[in-house]
Image (cartoon, rainbow, N blue to C red):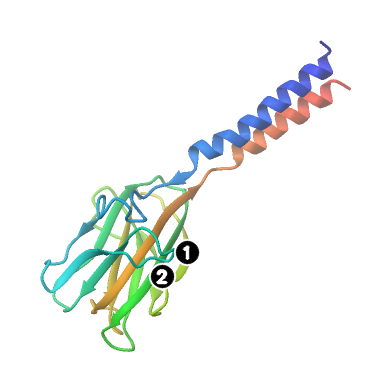
Amino acid sequence: MSLTTVGHYICFFLVCSSLAVPRAIAGELLANGGFEDGLNAWSFTGDGVTDTLGLSSDTPTAAGSSADLDINGPAGLPWLIQDVQVTSGMELTFTTSVKELEPNNPDAWIAGQVWMLPPSLASILSSTALFFTSPDWTTQTSTITVPAGATVARVLFTPQNPSFGVGAGRYLIDDVSLTFVPEPASIVLLGTICATLLARRR
């Protein structure tokens, strides 16, 4: 077998590896973002009486389930929450679909947020937010970079009033996703190795 053929085989292997590794590394950080497994993996801080969390069969795809968040008073902090582990420097994409069923007033909305927290969970190092007020299913996306010192990404939903305090209303939430983009440096490195191997055969 010639050196040229060996070089081509090696490059083929490296390219395949570069394609396979990101797929294995990249992925969904949230569990049960489509609420197909009920409310598992999610926490709710409402009192279960005036502020409740349930499931609905009304979804963007007319299949499966969505979370039904019904908040009726400003008391307390009725949040729908899920925490996931993250690493500084990760590039995250936050996506969700929301439908407003019962607005408390025309100026109210629900905020879907991602907070970047340190291990103590005592402060918000950075955040991103999506705001929903439509009576139709609406999908929005935002991106955020995990800052230095952050180890937890907290995804949370809560209705807000015009003063950004706790609001009221009823909202359906579905297809919540928090994904990360793999570092492309490894792909660049493999490409450089390929180029070097092929150059040496000349």
Seen in the picture, residue 201 relative to 190 is either above or below; the reply is: above
Q: Nearer the viewer, residue 31 or 84?
A: 31
Residue at 49% across, 43% down: 26
Count of marks, rendered view: 2
Q: Is residue 107 left or right of residue 165?
A: right
Q: Distance between the residues labelled 2 and 1?
A: 7 Å
Q: Is disc 2 in contact with disc 1, using a CB cutoff of under 8 Å?
A: yes
Q: Which of 197 and 68 is in front in this view?
A: 68
The C terminus sits in image quarter: top right
- Which callout, 2 or 1, points at the residue further toward the start of the chain? 2
- Residue 3, image x, y percentages: 82, 15
Q: Which numbered tag is attached to residue 130?
A: 2
- Residue 201, image x, y percentages: 85, 20
Quadrant for residue 39, please give it: bottom left
Seen in the picture, residue 26 relative to 117 is either above or below; the reply is: above
Mark 2 Cα shell of 10 Å, populated few (<14), some (14-19), many (≥20): some
Residue at 47% across, 64% down: 142
Residue at 36% across, 56% down: 34
Seen in the picture, residue 164 relative to 150 is either above or below; the reply is: below
Query: Looking at the image, which residue sits at the far top?
Result: 1
Secondary structure of residue under mark 2: strand
- Residue 131, image x, y percentages: 39, 74
- Residue 98, image x, y percentages: 38, 70
Quadrant for residue 57, please give it: bottom left
Q: Which of 99 and 84 is in front in this view?
A: 99
Residue at 41% across, 64% down: 62
User: In the rendered structure, which amino acid carries the disc numbered 1?
Assistant: Ser
Secondary structure of residue under mark 1: strand
Q: Which numbered tag is attached to residue 142?
A: 1
Query: Looking at the image, which residue sits at the far right?
Result: 202
Seen in the picture, residue 47 relative to 155 is either above or below; the reply is: below
